[in-house]
């Protein structure tokens, strides 16, 4: 089947922040062949292309996209036969992550329950190494299958080759952007493995050290509902900024001044700081609003945009927040959201 592009498609309909102008061309691809056609179309017309999934981590610009937007709508979930206590599942990139989580919980396969209710598609999860409540997808990924747009070949990358870091991977690098993820294979466990280290979860289960998977999924959904707005109704991309990762020395004086600042161990002897706490308790910015853009009144890390917000407004606002954080803490914070450019 040949895919045919739509023209002048409003990006606000395809992004959770609900901003942006139009895409010159837009393909929604449901097969590998359609994906190849869309890439070929872009190359033949000497146009850039940009891959989207559910649009929940994107800032589409008011100026639109003068190229080809390719929405990945590949579907299919295949569970393997258990080997010992491990079962693998291979999932096409366009599947909705939360449907997958619900399915694995239903089947009693452990690993994904802490990732409940994260918006978006499975194919985007390796890109920023999606994580929540003490679990990152990189811990579960066996391989990532990609279409290499430079060579036209399909490759399988191991977790190591995917170079996962905190909200980071090879797929975010200039080199890695040539890869379109077509499916992901996860390793799940038949053995109960409750992961309750994260403060919100450990206090939720203080009287119940061995909760079921269903109970963990329900807890995560309940905790998230108190922190995030409903992205289907309100413009948001969830956490707009990354939590800062720094050395203990760098934040010694900050920690002396604010001893209750939550600090988590990160890799290579570094620590991850709670930016939500910094924005709220140190900078007093929870609920701060300017015109159409604000920091959510229930969780300062979450940027919300009212109807009518422009990408320029969002970028100016987030820049202002970054400056305010720097003035108070000397920390340089980074944006988690990707610009469609
Ligand atoms: C309310 C809310 C809560 C959130 N909570 C969390 C959270 O707890 N933890 C977390 O980590 N994130 C969270 N996010 C961010 C977001 O859900 C994730 O980043 C998610 O993985 C994005 O999926 P998507 O399909 O919407 O990707 P998109 O937003 O469409 O794309 C994101 C990036 O991935 C690339 N991409 C997408 N699909 C592919 C593909 N198949 N191949 C190659 N590149 C691809 C895009 O080019 C882009 O760079 C939240 C967002 C919202 C709105």
Image: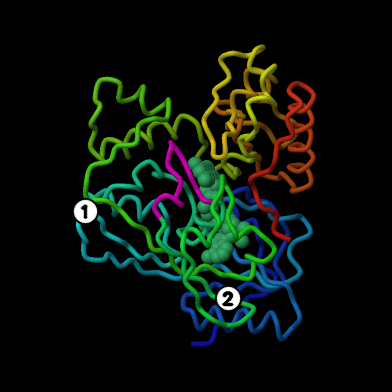
The answer to whether the residue labelled 2 contacts the one labelled 1, judged by CB atoms less than 8 Å apart, is no
Q: In the figure, residue 334 lies in which quadrant? A: top right
Local packing at callout 1 (Cα closer than 10 Å; few below 14, some 14-19, many 20+) is: few
- Name which of mark 2 and mark 1 comes first in the sequence: 1
Q: Residue 148 carries which label?
A: 2
- Where is mark 1, residue-wise? 85
Residue 289 seen from this side: yes
What secondary structure is marked by label 1? loop
Q: Nearer the viewer, residue 174 or 50?
A: 174
Residue in view at x 61 percent, y 35 percent: 243
Left/right of residue 294 with respect to residue 34 in the rendered view: right
Local packing at callout 2 (Cα closer than 10 Å; few below 14, some 14-19, many 20+) is: some
Position of residue 230 measured from the top left corner of the image (x, y, whole percent): 50, 40
Position of residue 175 measured from the top left corner of the image (x, y, whole percent): 67, 66
Magenta stretch encompasses residue 134: yes
Residue in view at x 42 percent, y 42 percent: 135
Asked if residue 37 is positioned above or below residue 197 in the image, the reply reads: below
Asked if residue 289 is positioned above or below residue 173 in the image, the reply reads: above
Q: Nearer the viewer, residue 230 or 222?
A: 222
Residue range in magenta is 129-140
Residue 231 seen from this side: no
């Amino acid at each position: 089947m040949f895919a045919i592009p739509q023209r002048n498609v409003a990006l606000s309909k395809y992004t959770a922040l609900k901003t942006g102008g139009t895409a010159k061309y837009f393909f929604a691809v449901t097969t590998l062949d359609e994906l190849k056609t869309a890439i070929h179309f872009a190359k033949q017309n000497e146009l850039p292309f940009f891959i989207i999934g559910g649009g929940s981590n994107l800032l589409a610009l008011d100026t639109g996209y003068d190229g080809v937007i390719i929405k990945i709508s590949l579907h299919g979930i295949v569970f393997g036969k258990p080997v010992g206590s491990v079962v693998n599942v291979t999932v096409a990139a366009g599947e909705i992550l939360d449907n997958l989580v619900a399915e694995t919980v239903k089947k009693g396969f452990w690993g994904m329950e802490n990732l409940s209710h994260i918006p978006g598609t499975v194919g985007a999860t390796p890109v920023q190494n999606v994580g929540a409540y003490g679990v990152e997808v990189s811990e579960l990924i066996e391989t990532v299958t990609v279409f290499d747009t430079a060579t036209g070949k399909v490759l399988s990358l191991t977790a190591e080759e995917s170079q996962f870091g905190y909200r980071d991977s090879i797929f975010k690098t200039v080199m890695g952007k040539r890869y379109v993820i077509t499916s992901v294979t996860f390793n799940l466990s038949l053995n109960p493995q409750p992961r309750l280290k994260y403060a919100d979860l450990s206090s939720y289960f203080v009287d119940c050290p061995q909760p079921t998977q269903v109970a963990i999924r329900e807890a995560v959904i309940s905790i998230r509902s108190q922190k995030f707005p409903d992205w289907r109704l309100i413009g948001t991309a969830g956490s707009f900024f990354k939590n800062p990762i720094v050395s203990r020395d760098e934040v010694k004086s900050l920690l002396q001044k604010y001893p209750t600042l939550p600090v988590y161990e990160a890799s290579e002897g570094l620590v991850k700081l709670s930016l939500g706490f910094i924005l709220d308790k140190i900078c007093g910015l929870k609920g701060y609003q300017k015109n159409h853009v604000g920091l959510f009144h229930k969780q300062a890390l979450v940027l919300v945009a009212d109807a009518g917000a422009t990408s320029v407004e969002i970028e100016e606002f987030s820049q202002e927040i970054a400056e305010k954080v720097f003035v108070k803490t000397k920390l340089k914070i980074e944006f988690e959201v990707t610009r469609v450019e």
